[in-house]
Each structure stands twice: as C-alpha cells, then as structure tokens.
Amino acid sequence: MRRVLCDTLFSFCFNSMQSYNIGIIGAGSWGTTLAHLLAEKGFSITQWVFEEELFHALKRTRCNTIYLPGVALHESIVYTQSLTEAVHEKQIVLWVTPSRVFRTLFEKAHPFFHREAIQVCASKGIENDTLKCLSEIAEDKDPSFRKQRYVAISGPSFAIEVCKKIPTAVVVASRDIKSASIIQEVMATPWLRTYTSQDIIGVELGGALKNIIAVATGVADGLGYGCNTRAALITRGLAEIIRLGVAMGADPLTFSGLSGLGDLVLTCTSSISRNYRVGLKLGQGMGLEEILSDMNMVAEGVYTTRAAFFLAQKYQVDMPITSEVYHLLYEKKPAQQAVKDLMGRNLKREVPV
C-alpha cells in the first residue's frame, strides 16, 4: 500500500512543472550550467560533485572556480559527494560526466533510482572498450531504457553562452516521446529552445563524432591553412558521420539538424571548443600528452576518435578524416603527412555520403 501511494505521489509530481526533484551527476562546465538553469526555473536540484576541492568551493562560494569561473550560481542548489543522495527519489536524473566513467557511475547509482525516474544524458561520447553509445550502456544495465525513460540531449551549446542567456537551441531525443516531451518542457527557457527527436542513436552519434572533426579543423588552423580547408573538413567530415550513422541504424536526416551539422559547425569554428584547441596545438607542433596535461577539462574527441576508428572497421565504413586523426593522435603521425595523405587519395565522384 505504501509503495502504491509513493508511486501515485511520484506520478502526480510529473504533472506539476514546479515540483520536479532533479539529481545532476557531474559538475563540469555543462553540468554546472544546467544545474544553475534548472534551479532558476524553480526546480529542486541536488548536484553530485566528484572533486573534493571543488565540492567545498561550491558550498563556500557558490561559484565553480575550476570549470565555470566568474558565474554566480543559484543559491538553492544542493551539492553532495554522495551518489546515492544525488539520485534517490529523484524524478529526473541528469548525467553530465565524461563518457569513460559513465558506465561505472550509472551501475553504482542504478539500485537507488526510482523506477519511474527519467534518465537524461547530456554527455557526448562513445565507450572505447565496447564501442557503445551511452544509451546502449544504460540498456546493458536495464533493458527497459531501450523503450522508455531514457533521453539524450545534444546540440550546439557552449556552457558559458547558455549561462549568459545567449539564444541557443538543442535537441532532446528518446524512443519514448512522452519522456522526450517532459524533458523538452523542463529544459526550455526563453533563451534555450528545445526540439524533440526519436532518433536517439543519431543524436548521440552526431554529438560524439563532431568532436573528431573539430580536432581535424584545429590541426588545419594550427598548420596555418585557411577557410577553404576548414569548409572542406566540415563538409566531408559530415559525410563520414552520416555514413557511420546510417550503418548503425540512424536516420540520415538527423545529421542535418542541431546534433549533427549544428554542433559540427560550432565546435569546428570556435576556439572555445576544447577539441578544436587540442587540434590547434597539435598542428602547432605540441605533443598530445603535453596538451592534455595542460587542460582541466576533458576533450572527448581524443577518446571518441579511437572508438570511431574501430567502429568504421566494424561496419566497413570509409572514414578517411577520422582515420588520419586517429593516426595523428595514437601513432604520432606528422600532421603535414596526414594532410598530404588525405589530399592524395584516389579521385572520386562527390556523393553526400
């Protein structure tokens, strides 16, 4: 009887926009931004913070001095280092962690999820060991997420610009249109416009694979090339993304949207992009280890490149830009030689994919 009553109250809260109790896992720049945005909307926010130093700084100063300095965060956000506290009895759990730790954290938190809670993933990446998208990792733990209560968010959205309330648009994807619609309303603000999609694999792949092309465009700029080169990389990079996406069951039209072309253009044309900056420094002659040691945030493209390289082999998809970025990152191939090999391939007819 008590369980039935709790479930009734839990469902009732989903009908009241101001009653959502939300747990956020991760306190990087994007996780911090989303916590602040949702707290401003009046939601109850509990945010899990991994770094002990950052945890104490957030509680003391209400400012993320490591990942989002200078932004005064909403006073109602509750910070915790307890994963259980962050997810227990939450109606929505929002994941904003590096992709390589997603499985471990998701499995640890899973026993404490409310059975009706919607899991929302705003992380972008592919698991290197299994070559799985993050939704597939969730489905490994709980097959019910394949049909309902799992949502992915992606799109061109630098955290600092969202914090500054600069107009931004993202896509909310789920096979379960009800869950997508709920999260669409939860996330929407006058400066953050949200669209829905049911192509969750396409949205996840677009958000992950664009980081590889951002590394490539950064390399080109580091070598001193111009706008022609960048435009060619974006265009042919998109063709590679579509080829792999279609092979993995995605709708090709998804990649002309916010999580595909939109995010691709953003990350390939701005120095705010961590992945672009990695490529830029590689093109300027710095070593990868030195570049990564100087960064306090994760450049997902470095890890996604490896996964995409092997996915291309698995699905027998031609991805020449991705292959050259892989050789550059993991085999220390000289950047100039990578460009020479790309430009020297056999001539062919242009087709969109």
Image (tube, helix red, strand yellow):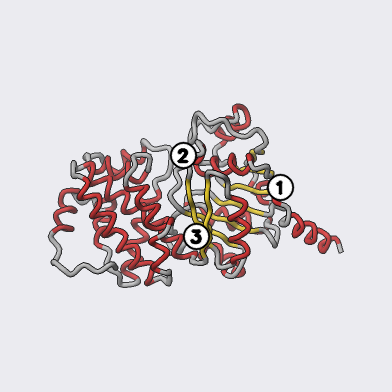
Tell which of 57 and 30 is nearer to you: 30
Quarter occupied by the C terminus: bottom left
**Contact flag, marks 2 and 3 (Cβ < 8 Å):** no
Q: Position of residue 300 (x, y in %)?
A: 40, 50
Q: Marks 2/3: CA distance?
A: 25 Å
Q: State left or right for residue 217 relative to residue 24.
A: left
Instruction: Please name whichever residue, 57 or 23, is drawn nearer the observer in this view of the structure.
Output: 23
The residue at which mark 1 appears reads as 18
Residue drawn 27% across the image and 40% down it: 281
- Residue receiving disc 2: 161
The picture places residue 270, in percent across and down from the top left corner, at 34, 42
Q: Is residue 48 above or below residue 324?
A: above
User: CB under 8 Å between callouts 2 and 1?
Assistant: no
Crowding near pointer 2: few (<14 within 10 Å), some, many (20+)?
Answer: few
What amino acid is labelled 2 in the image?
Glu
Element on which disc 3 rests = helix
Q: Quickly name the residue at label 3.
A: 134
